[in-house]
Amino acid sequence: MSTALAADERILSDPVLNTGVFALFVAITLFVVYRVSHRNRSTADYYAAGSVFTGRQNGIALSGDFLSAASFLGIAGAIAIHGYDGFLYSIGFLVAWLVDLLLIAELLRNTGRFTMGDVLSFRMRQRPVRAAAATSTLVISFFYMLAQMAGAGGLVALLLNIHSGFGQALVIGVVGLVMVLYVLVGGMKGTTWVQIIKAGLLILSATGITVFLFGKFGFSFSGLLSAAADNSPLGEQLLEPGGRYGANDTSKLDFVSLAVALILGAAALPHVLMRFYTVPNAREARRSVVWATACMFVFYLCTLVIGFGAAALVDADTIRNAPGGENSAAPLLALEIGGTLLLGIVSAVAFATILAVVAGLTITASASFAHDVYANIVKRGKASADTEIRVARYTAVVVGVLSIIGGILANGQNVAFLVALAFAVAASANLSTLLYSLFWKRFNTMGTLCGIYGGLAACLVLVLFSPVISGAPDSVFPAIDFAWFPLRNPGLVSIPFSFLCGFVGTLLGRTKADPGKHAEMEVRSLTGIGA
């Protein structure tokens, strides 16, 4: 407890410095966003940045989009507290990109234009399929935003030593407003440059802290691990499987469910899929994934060192009792090894991470509603570009308000865990329909609707009646218990169920698949002709 108080005192030693670093980053990135925003003259400019980015640029931006608060704050905290089992998040997030590279990136870039709905509706009935795609995109974006906003609340609360619920809610609200401003001003082009800057800062910061930690322990990884085990309540178990998963059959199944969701979810995240449209062709889309994977490989190796470094140098109780809980491990480690200056820098980078990811999510959600729902369902493809962009901006404001409310409710949860839920929702709602649309000739409109709505409903119902919401000390509502589903991540059940729904729906659907449209889609997806 005395360590926690000492940490609080050092955090308060220079709050002006901490706030100043935040403000500097926001000012610089807003200037960059403003400089590129004047070229947003069409929907292609606003949604897909005019497809002008190279594979390298988009790959770095992809890593910036994907390396969220879960990666920097949540995983470091999970490793610091749970050890080996916390690193499983890193492995799952990284391996997931193989699915994108081998199955999704090139075919999606050739087939669609702006959103996932373009691909799913290519050979189906446009209006119901686009409505379903927009629904799943909005729900997934909301779940993902919960993690980022919760991370923002804990991070800035740690910096400014805000323990009250109202103060942290106010912080989340400010983060939401800045995020909406990025999207309103810059569109996809501005958001992409923010993500490139943020990815560079994040990887450099993580690498710098890693090198410093290695030096502190004589460049001996085993020495670092030994110190972490000695300083952890788990002892040697910190370095072994089972710190969080494996205590019983339910927790083992929970681990399998988590792994399935992490590996399959990335290929179905709408804000990741939308990035493939910011490059000019499929070759650059593949290069994007290669660059993104390389960047994330370096970063996730660093999270292993940072997590165990936090376990070695910061007391576990200090981490748990700090504002933000487990999410405070990396900032507290920065405070321990570099004082308030390094804390301010690391926290600003984490803050940049949150802003960039939430901005990407917001533009994806607003584009899906404006392009799929307004332009193609309400206006039947006859909306003007100016009107469609205006609707997208209005939607961004609404999405921002909802994410602020949800982030306040989810404040205190481990953000890596919350993102894993978003991965489960994405894989349950989108993956089956994307793969069926691209590879199954008989797939039809009924199968698409059953796959999206069936998987989405199953995932949401299972989460609602799981220990995530009630019945556990760390639940959203710990005082009540209406949980009957034992797993904290529903992916093991909801993802196969969505594939089953898509298959059964296709067999029962009255409207048969159009072989001509399938042939056109196959040629286009494989060759890029007509893209």
Image (cartoon, grey):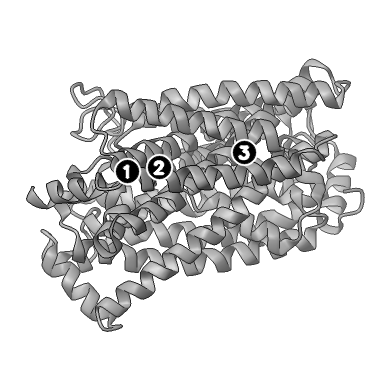
Instruction: For marks 3 and 1, give the one nearer the viewer.
Output: 1
Disc 3 marks which residue? 503
Mark 1: give few (<14), some (14-19) or many (20+) Cα within 10 Å. Answer: some
Q: Which mark is residue 124?
A: none
Whether the residues at callouts 3 and 2 have beta carbons within 8 Å, the answer is: no
Label 3 Cα crowd, 10 Å radius (few <14 / some 14-19 / many 20+): many
Q: Give the camera-side residue of 26 and 97.
A: 26
Most distant residue in the top direction: 378
Residues under numbered marks 2 and 1 in contact, where contact means CB atoms less than 8 Å apart: yes
Residue at numbered disc 2: 19
Q: Nearer the viewer, mark 3 or mark 2?
A: 2
Disc 2 residue type (three-letter): Thr
Disc 1 residue type? Pro
- Front in this rendered view, residue 517 or 217: 217
Q: Residue at x 30, y 34 (%)?
A: 468
Dot 3: what SS?
A: helix
Q: Position of residue 94 (x, y in %)?
A: 49, 61
